[in-house]
Image (spheres, helix red, strand yellow):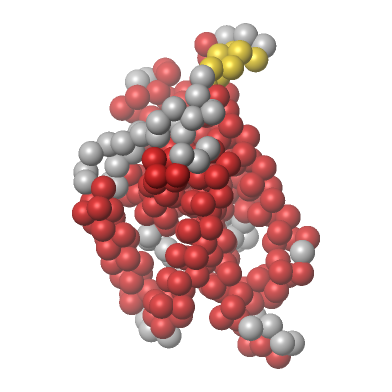
Amino acid sequence: MTLLQVVVGGLLLGAVYALFASGLTLIWGMMNFINFAHGEFVMLGMYAALLVVTWLGGGPALFALAAALVLFALGAAIYFGLIRHVLRGPMLAQILSTFGLALVLRYTAFWIFSANFVSLPQTALSGTLSIGGLLLPVPQLAAGVAALALTAGLHLLLTRTAVGSQLLAVAEDREAAMLVGIRPDRMQALAWGLAAGSAGLAGALMATAYPWSPSVGATFGLTAFITVTLGGFGSVPGALYAGLMVGAIQALSAYWLGPIYKDVVVYALFVALLWLRPQGLMGRA
C-alpha cells in the first residue's frame, strides 16, 4: 500500500509537470523557439497565488484563475515586446534573449519577495483524503486532477477548434497562413500567452502543496525541458505521458534510493532514452 501511495503521489506531481511542459512544447511546435524563461513563468504563478491569498483573501479557484490570466497577459506582452524582434536575428540571439529574460524575472522576484522560502496559508484545499486506503494530501490531489484536465483541454483546443487550426497552420507554414487571412503575429502572441498562462496556472496549483523561493524557476525550467524532450518536441500528449513518467520515476527513486537520488535517476534515464530514441516518445524523427 505504501508503494502504491508513492506511485500515485508521483503521478499527481507528474500531471502538474505535464501542464507547464505543454506550454513549452507549444512554443517549440509553433515557432521552433526555445524559451529558457519558462520555469520563471511557473515561479511567477506561485507568487501570483500568494498575493491573491494574502491581499484579497481569495480561494483556490480565484488565485488559479488570477495566475493564469496575469501570466497569459505577460506572455503575450513578452512576445510583442521582445520575441517578435529577436525572431529576425540568429539562433544565438534567440537563445540569449530568453536566458536574459529568465535572469531578469528571477532577480526581480528576489528584489520584491526576498530569497526566503514561502508557502500559501491554509486554504480550502488543506487536509488529507482517504481513498481506498490511500492517504492523499488534498492539495496534491486537486493539483494533479486539475492539471490532467487542463492539459487535455489544451490538446483539444489545438486539435478540435478553429483557433487551434489557425495556430497549427502558422506552425506549419507562416507565409501560407498569411495568404488565407491568418495573422501570424496574433497567433504567435496567443501561443506565448497560452504557454505562459498554463505555466502560471501550474505554478498556482503547485503553490498549494510545496514551499518555494524565486530560485525554484530554474528547477522547474529544467524539469520542463526534460519532460518536453522525452515526450517529443511539439507533442502535447507526449508532454503528458512524459510528465507522468518523470513524476513516477522521481517518486519511486526517492522511495527506494533516497530523495537526493531522484533527479539523478531521471537524468540518467533521460540520456538513455534519447540515445535510443532521439525524437522522444511521440516526436517525429
- Left or right of residue 101, residue 5 in this image: right
Which residue is located at x 21 percent, y 43 percent? 115
**Residue at horizontal 34%, vertical 28%?**
261
**Which quarter of the figure is the N terminus placed in?**
top right
Q: Quadrant of the C terminus?
A: bottom right
Q: Residue furthest front?
A: 56
Apparent side of residue 284 relative to residue 40 in the rendered image (left or right): right
Taking the image as drawn, is residue 264 in sight? Answer: no
Q: From the viewer's perspective, is 119 left or right of 247?
A: left
Q: Is residue 112 visible?
A: yes
Q: Is 285 situated above or below 148?
A: below
Which of these two is toward me, 208 or 243? 208
**Which residue is at the front of the view, 261 or 162?**
162
Residue found 31% across the figure and 70% down from its top: 96
Q: Residue furthest bottom?
A: 179
Q: Is residue 166 above or below residue 145?
A: below
Lateral position of residue 236 relative to residue 28, left or right: right
Q: Residue drawn 35% across and 49% down?
A: 217
Question: Where is residue 197 shown, x and y percent of the image?
Answer: 53, 57
All told, the count of numbered labels is 0
Place of residue 249 in the rendered image (x, y in percent of width and height, measured from the top left): 48, 30
